[in-house]
Image (spheres, rainbow, N blue to C red):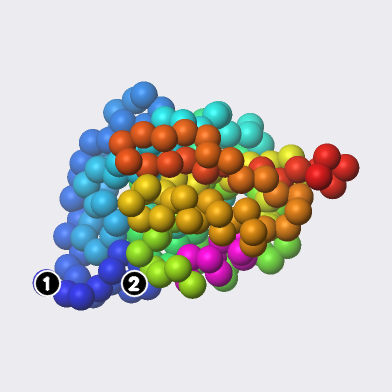
Amino acid sequence: MTSEHYFSAQPVSELNLRQFTVHLVGQPYELTTAGGIFSPERIDAGTAVLLSNVPKPPPGGHLLDLGCGWGPISLTLAIESPHATVWAVDVNERALDLVRRNAAHLGLTNINACLPQDVPADMRFMTIWSNPPIRVGKNELHGMLENWLPRLDSEADAWLVVQRNLGSDSLHRWLDGALPGDFAVTRAATGKGYRVLRVRRRSLATA
Protein backbone atom coordinates (compact mmCIF):
# COMPACT_ATOMS: atom_id res chain seq x y z
CA MET A 1 0.00 0.00 0.00
CA THR A 2 1.31 3.45 -0.85
CA SER A 3 0.78 6.73 1.00
CA GLU A 4 -0.38 8.56 -2.12
CA HIS A 5 -3.70 10.40 -2.29
CA TYR A 6 -6.26 10.65 -5.07
CA PHE A 7 -4.97 14.19 -5.59
CA SER A 8 -1.44 12.96 -6.32
CA ALA A 9 -0.36 14.27 -9.70
CA GLN A 10 1.10 10.97 -10.92
CA PRO A 11 -0.06 7.95 -8.88
CA VAL A 12 2.61 5.29 -8.42
CA SER A 13 0.19 2.51 -7.46
CA GLU A 14 -0.56 -0.22 -9.99
CA LEU A 15 -2.77 0.94 -12.84
CA ASN A 16 -5.03 -2.14 -12.77
CA LEU A 17 -7.47 -1.08 -15.49
CA ARG A 18 -10.89 -2.71 -15.20
CA GLN A 19 -14.45 -2.25 -16.39
CA PHE A 20 -17.48 -1.36 -14.31
CA THR A 21 -21.09 -0.35 -14.92
CA VAL A 22 -22.40 3.02 -13.78
CA HIS A 23 -25.71 4.84 -14.28
CA LEU A 24 -25.50 8.37 -15.70
CA VAL A 25 -28.59 10.41 -16.60
CA GLY A 26 -30.67 7.32 -15.88
CA GLN A 27 -28.83 5.04 -18.31
CA PRO A 28 -26.26 2.27 -17.67
CA TYR A 29 -22.82 2.68 -19.18
CA GLU A 30 -19.82 0.36 -19.20
CA LEU A 31 -16.76 2.40 -18.30
CA THR A 32 -13.10 1.89 -17.42
CA THR A 33 -11.60 2.59 -14.02
CA ALA A 34 -8.21 2.13 -12.34
CA GLY A 35 -6.41 2.32 -9.02
CA GLY A 36 -4.91 5.50 -7.58
CA ILE A 37 -7.98 7.70 -8.14
CA PHE A 38 -10.95 8.88 -6.07
CA SER A 39 -13.86 6.42 -5.69
CA PRO A 40 -12.60 4.16 -8.49
CA GLU A 41 -15.50 1.73 -8.80
CA ARG A 42 -18.66 3.74 -8.19
CA ILE A 43 -20.13 7.21 -8.06
CA ASP A 44 -19.32 8.37 -4.53
CA ALA A 45 -22.14 9.48 -2.23
CA GLY A 46 -21.34 13.19 -2.47
CA THR A 47 -21.28 13.25 -6.25
CA ALA A 48 -24.54 11.27 -6.31
CA VAL A 49 -26.16 13.90 -4.07
CA LEU A 50 -24.85 16.67 -6.32
CA LEU A 51 -26.11 15.04 -9.52
CA SER A 52 -29.53 14.48 -7.92
CA ASN A 53 -29.94 18.13 -6.94
CA VAL A 54 -28.63 20.27 -9.77
CA PRO A 55 -30.75 21.65 -12.62
CA LYS A 56 -29.99 20.70 -16.20
CA PRO A 57 -26.76 22.34 -17.33
CA PRO A 58 -26.73 25.15 -19.89
CA PRO A 59 -27.09 23.82 -23.45
CA GLY A 60 -23.98 25.59 -24.73
CA GLY A 61 -20.90 27.51 -23.71
CA HIS A 62 -18.06 26.34 -21.49
CA LEU A 63 -18.90 24.12 -18.50
CA LEU A 64 -16.42 23.19 -15.77
CA ASP A 65 -16.06 20.04 -13.66
CA LEU A 66 -13.53 21.04 -11.01
CA GLY A 67 -11.74 18.03 -9.52
CA CYS A 68 -13.19 15.64 -12.06
CA GLY A 69 -11.75 12.29 -10.93
CA TRP A 70 -12.68 9.55 -13.39
CA GLY A 71 -15.41 11.80 -14.73
CA PRO A 72 -18.98 11.10 -13.53
CA ILE A 73 -19.78 14.82 -13.48
CA SER A 74 -17.96 15.60 -16.74
CA LEU A 75 -19.62 12.72 -18.57
CA THR A 76 -23.03 13.78 -17.26
CA LEU A 77 -22.47 17.36 -18.43
CA ALA A 78 -21.30 16.18 -21.84
CA ILE A 79 -24.26 13.82 -22.30
CA GLU A 80 -26.82 16.40 -21.23
CA SER A 81 -25.26 19.32 -23.12
CA PRO A 82 -23.80 17.91 -26.35
CA HIS A 83 -23.34 21.38 -27.84
CA ALA A 84 -21.37 22.69 -24.86
CA THR A 85 -17.65 22.30 -24.19
CA VAL A 86 -16.95 20.52 -20.92
CA TRP A 87 -13.66 21.18 -19.15
CA ALA A 88 -12.73 18.25 -16.89
CA VAL A 89 -10.00 19.57 -14.61
CA ASP A 90 -7.90 17.59 -12.14
CA VAL A 91 -4.30 17.36 -10.95
CA ASN A 92 -4.35 13.55 -11.14
CA GLU A 93 -3.12 12.63 -14.62
CA ARG A 94 -4.37 9.05 -14.32
CA ALA A 95 -7.87 10.34 -13.63
CA LEU A 96 -7.67 12.62 -16.66
CA ASP A 97 -6.62 9.68 -18.84
CA LEU A 98 -9.67 7.75 -17.63
CA VAL A 99 -11.96 10.66 -18.49
CA ARG A 100 -10.51 10.67 -22.01
CA ARG A 101 -10.89 6.90 -22.35
CA ASN A 102 -14.47 6.92 -21.14
CA ALA A 103 -15.45 9.94 -23.23
CA ALA A 104 -14.04 8.25 -26.34
CA HIS A 105 -15.83 5.01 -25.48
CA LEU A 106 -19.16 6.87 -25.21
CA GLY A 107 -18.52 8.86 -28.38
CA LEU A 108 -18.41 12.16 -26.49
CA THR A 109 -16.25 14.64 -28.37
CA ASN A 110 -17.07 17.71 -26.27
CA ILE A 111 -14.86 17.01 -23.22
CA ASN A 112 -11.44 18.57 -22.64
CA ALA A 113 -9.74 16.67 -19.81
CA CYS A 114 -6.75 18.69 -18.67
CA LEU A 115 -4.58 19.96 -15.85
CA PRO A 116 -5.62 23.27 -14.23
CA GLN A 117 -2.80 25.20 -15.89
CA ASP A 118 -3.92 24.05 -19.33
CA VAL A 119 -7.26 25.90 -19.18
CA PRO A 120 -6.99 29.26 -20.99
CA ALA A 121 -6.67 32.05 -18.43
CA ASP A 122 -9.46 34.09 -20.02
CA MET A 123 -11.95 31.19 -20.09
CA ARG A 124 -15.34 31.93 -18.49
CA PHE A 125 -17.88 29.28 -17.54
CA MET A 126 -21.64 29.03 -17.85
CA THR A 127 -21.65 26.68 -14.86
CA ILE A 128 -19.24 24.95 -12.49
CA TRP A 129 -20.09 21.60 -10.90
CA SER A 130 -17.72 20.25 -8.28
CA ASN A 131 -17.23 17.73 -5.52
CA PRO A 132 -14.15 19.61 -4.30
CA PRO A 133 -11.22 17.74 -2.73
CA ILE A 134 -11.81 18.75 0.88
CA ARG A 135 -8.94 16.60 2.13
CA VAL A 136 -6.29 18.68 0.36
CA GLY A 137 -6.51 21.06 3.33
CA LYS A 138 -8.28 24.33 3.98
CA ASN A 139 -5.65 26.65 2.48
CA GLU A 140 -5.36 24.64 -0.73
CA LEU A 141 -9.14 24.33 -1.04
CA HIS A 142 -9.73 28.04 -0.45
CA GLY A 143 -7.07 28.97 -2.99
CA MET A 144 -8.64 26.68 -5.57
CA LEU A 145 -12.12 28.13 -5.10
CA GLU A 146 -10.82 31.72 -5.07
CA ASN A 147 -9.16 31.00 -8.41
CA TRP A 148 -12.04 29.28 -10.20
CA LEU A 149 -15.33 30.67 -8.88
CA PRO A 150 -14.64 34.23 -10.13
CA ARG A 151 -14.43 32.71 -13.63
CA LEU A 152 -18.20 32.21 -13.67
CA ASP A 153 -20.10 34.20 -16.26
CA SER A 154 -22.59 36.79 -15.05
CA GLU A 155 -25.92 35.21 -14.06
CA ALA A 156 -24.23 31.79 -13.84
CA ASP A 157 -24.11 29.28 -10.99
CA ALA A 158 -21.56 27.00 -9.39
CA TRP A 159 -22.80 23.92 -7.54
CA LEU A 160 -20.55 22.46 -4.83
CA VAL A 161 -21.21 19.38 -2.71
CA VAL A 162 -19.53 19.15 0.70
CA GLN A 163 -19.97 16.65 3.51
CA ARG A 164 -21.51 18.28 6.57
CA ASN A 165 -19.00 16.65 8.93
CA LEU A 166 -16.12 17.90 6.80
CA GLY A 167 -17.01 21.57 7.10
CA SER A 168 -19.82 22.43 4.69
CA ASP A 169 -21.20 25.13 6.99
CA SER A 170 -17.81 26.72 7.65
CA LEU A 171 -17.07 26.67 3.92
CA HIS A 172 -20.42 28.37 3.29
CA ARG A 173 -19.49 31.13 5.75
CA TRP A 174 -16.03 31.50 4.25
CA LEU A 175 -17.42 31.80 0.72
CA ASP A 176 -19.84 34.48 1.89
CA GLY A 177 -16.93 36.56 3.16
CA ALA A 178 -14.28 35.76 0.59
CA LEU A 179 -16.14 36.20 -2.71
CA PRO A 180 -16.81 39.60 -4.30
CA GLY A 181 -20.10 41.40 -3.73
CA ASP A 182 -21.69 40.18 -6.95
CA PHE A 183 -21.73 36.61 -5.60
CA ALA A 184 -24.45 35.05 -3.45
CA VAL A 185 -24.07 31.72 -1.64
CA THR A 186 -27.05 29.62 -0.57
CA ARG A 187 -27.65 26.08 0.61
CA ALA A 188 -29.56 24.46 -2.23
CA ALA A 189 -30.08 20.92 -0.91
CA THR A 190 -29.10 18.39 1.75
CA GLY A 191 -28.92 14.62 1.63
CA LYS A 192 -27.02 11.67 3.08
CA GLY A 193 -24.89 13.93 5.27
CA TYR A 194 -23.95 16.24 2.38
CA ARG A 195 -24.92 19.78 1.50
CA VAL A 196 -25.12 21.28 -1.95
CA LEU A 197 -24.05 24.92 -2.07
CA ARG A 198 -25.15 27.18 -4.89
CA VAL A 199 -22.79 30.02 -5.71
CA ARG A 200 -24.56 32.53 -7.95
CA ARG A 201 -22.78 35.30 -9.83
CA ARG A 202 -25.31 38.06 -10.24
CA SER A 203 -25.15 40.82 -12.79
CA LEU A 204 -23.55 44.01 -11.52
CA ALA A 205 -26.91 45.78 -11.81
CA THR A 206 -28.60 43.14 -9.63
CA ALA A 207 -25.74 43.02 -7.16
Q: Is-magenta flag for residue 142?
A: yes
Q: What residue type is labelled 2?
A: Ser
Question: At 24% from the left edge and 52% from the top edge, which residue is drawn?
Answer: 40
Answer few, some or many: residues within 10 Å of disc 2's Cα (few below 14, many 20 plus, some between 14 and 19). some
In the image as oriented, which residue stretches furthest toward the top?
A: 26
Magenta span: chief secondary structure: helix
Q: Nearer the viewer, residue 105 or 19?
A: 19
Q: In this view, does 24 lie to the left or right of 13?
A: right
Q: Residues under labels 1 and 2: Cα distance?
A: 14 Å
Question: At 29% from the left edge and 56% from the top edge, which residue is drawn?
Answer: 38
Q: In this view, does 13 lie to the left or right of 154?
A: left
Which of the two labelled residues, at mark 1 and mark 2, occupies the earlier sequence position? 1
The answer to whether marks 1 and 2 mark residues whose Cβ atoms lie closer than 8 Å is: no
Q: What stretch is highlighted in magenta?
A: 140-149
Q: What residue type is labelled 1?
A: Met
Q: Is residue 144 left or right of residue 137?
A: right
Q: Mark 1 points at which residue?
A: 1
Q: Name the residue under label 2.
A: 8
Quick check: 143 above or below 63? below
Q: Is mark 2 on a helix, strand or loop?
A: loop
Q: Is mark 1 on a helix, strand or loop?
A: loop
**Residue 159 x/y as whole percent:** 54, 43
Residue 76's disc is none
**Residue 163 x/y as whole percent:** 36, 48
Q: Is residue 65 visible?
A: no
Answer few, some or many: residues within 10 Å of disc 1's Cα (few below 14, many 20 plus, some between 14 and 19). few
